[in-house]
Image (cartoon, helix red, strand yellow):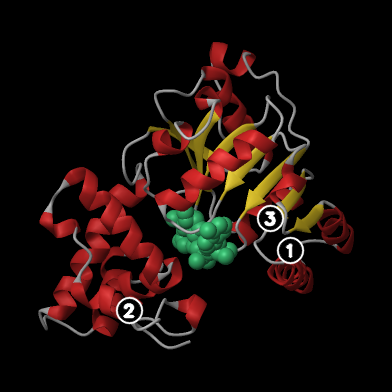
């Protein structure tokens, strides 16, 4: 469990009753499920009423699978679902204590959302982003509360992965960062602290490797199946690079590499042509049932 030390811990005065989640894709849905299981009310905002209802159904189905496997009890499932509300209106997030923005990995979209949310939510509300790589400071600058903006970066699948990166832009107050850590702790996740630099810790180290795996396949060194088998068997990784890219989403992977390339400039961070081509063809990985592999 994360430990929040010293004076920073004592600065947390905010109570977390309701969290708003923006975006109902792979991550938004998973994060909302984690929050619901922690006993905190969660309001998921999707752009349409249909996708909002579909997200609630997806959470119900995910909890059912855990129930069938005896990982949770019926009472725990019912309790989690009682904390979930969905909406297609940003205004319905007005009473939230914390927002986690988890929309598409596109800075302009996120900045527009932060600007709108800043006008809707109460003054004490902390605005956070689940961005994988984009500068959190640019979202903070879109608001009139830059001291209350930070990154709370979950990993995929959010229900299973224990880590959350708490990302600190230079504008964030100690209280905001302490609050974010309290929230991560309430979600029974492990927090690490990182400054606002592209890719934070994990993706800054992971994506050069993933992009290099594609370069190796493009060069004809080995098949993607053998590269995946090699990295599982040779490095004890739970999955190989191509399976992982498909899990992350190939469009999201392009956006992550572009953000890393924009900051660090290394040519090895430019998204590989094969990755870009798959995205152009609408092959986005598991979420579209076709990426490097078929699902
Ligand atoms: N996929 C991963 O492995 C992973 C892991 C950690 C963090 N993230 C981050 O989480 C965020 C969401 O990624 P995802 O994998 O869930 O993507 P996704 O493609 O599954 O979902 C994206 C969501 O954004 C919504 N959206 C698109 N345009 C929008 C707009 N203009 N306004 C509001 N919502 C909009 C879509 O409707 C969808 O619900 C991104 O910032 C991504 O970098 C992704």
Compared with 78, 3 (above or below) is: above
Residue 75 position within the rendered picture, expressed as x and y whole percent measured from the top left: 89, 58
The answer to whether the residue bearing label 3 lies less than 8 angstroms from the nearest atom of ligand 1 is: no
Contact? badges 3 and 2 (CB < 8 Å): no
Picture coordinates of residue 41, whole percent (x, y): 79, 45
Task: Give the crowd class for mark 2: few <14, some 14-19, many >=20 residues within 10 Å.
Answer: few
Question: Secondary structure beneath disc 2?
Answer: helix
Task: Write down the quadrant of residue 239 in the picture.
Answer: bottom left
The residue under the point 27% across, 56% down is 258
Mark 2 or mark 1, which has the lower sequence index?
A: 1
Whether the residue under disc 1 has CB within 8 Å of ligand 1 = no
Q: Secondary structure at mark 3?
A: strand
Instruction: Examine the image and state in which quarter residue 117 appears.
Output: top right
Q: Could you give the CA–CA distance between mark 2 and mark 1, rounded to whole angstroms?
A: 40 Å
Kindly state the secondary structure of the residue where label 1 is placed: loop
Mark 2, residue position:
280
Residue 260 makes an appearance in the image: yes
- From the viewer's side, name the closer residue of 28 and 187: 28
Pick the front one: 214 or 190: 214
Q: Residue at x 33, y 46 (%)?
A: 199
N-term mark: 3 or 1: 3
**Which sits in the foreground, 172 or 112?**
112
* Alpha carbons under labels 3 and 1: distance apart: 28 Å
Q: Which residue is mark 3?
A: 45
Q: Is residue 19 left or right of residue 292?
A: right
User: Whole-Å distance between the Cαs marked 3 and 2?
Assistant: 28 Å
| Residue 33, quarter of picture | bottom right
Residue at label 1? 71
């Amino acid at each position: 469990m994360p430990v929040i030390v010293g004076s920073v811990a004592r600065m947390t005065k905010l109570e977390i009753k309701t969290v708003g989640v923006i975006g109902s894709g792979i991550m938004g849905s998973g994060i909302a499920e984690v929050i619901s299981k922690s006993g905190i009310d969660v309001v998921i905002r999707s752009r349409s009423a249909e996708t909002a209802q579909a997200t609630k159904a997806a959470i119900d189905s995910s909890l059912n699978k855990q129930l069938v496997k005896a990982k949770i009890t019926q009472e725990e499932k019912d309790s989690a679902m009682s904390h979930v509300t969905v909406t297609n209106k940003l205004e319905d997030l007005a009473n939230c204590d914390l927002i986690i923005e988890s929309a598409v990995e596109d800075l302009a979209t996120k900045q527009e959302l932060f600007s709108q949310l800043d006008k809707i939510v109460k003054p004490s509300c902390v605005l956070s982003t689940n961005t994988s790589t984009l500068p959190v400071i640019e979202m903070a600058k879109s608001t009139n509360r830059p001291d209350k903006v930070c990154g709370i970066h979950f990993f995929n699948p959010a229900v299973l992965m224990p880590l959350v990166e708490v990302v600190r832009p230079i504008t964030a107050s100690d209280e905001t960062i302490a609050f974010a850590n309290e929230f991560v702790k309430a979600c029974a996740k492990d927090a690490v602290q990182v400054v606002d630099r592209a890719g934070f810790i994990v993706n800054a180290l992971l994506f050069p490797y993933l992009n290099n795996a594609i370069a190796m396949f493009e060069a004809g060194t080995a098949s993607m199946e053998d590269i995946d088998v090699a990295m599982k068997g040779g490095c004890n990784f739970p999955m190989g690079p191509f399976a992982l890219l498909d899990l992350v989403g190939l469009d999201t992977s392009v956006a992550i590499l572009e953000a890393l390339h924009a900051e660090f400039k290394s040519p090895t961070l430019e998204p590989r042509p094969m990755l870009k081509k798959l995205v152009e063809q609408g092959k986005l990985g598991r979420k579209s049932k076709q990426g490097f592999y078929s699902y």
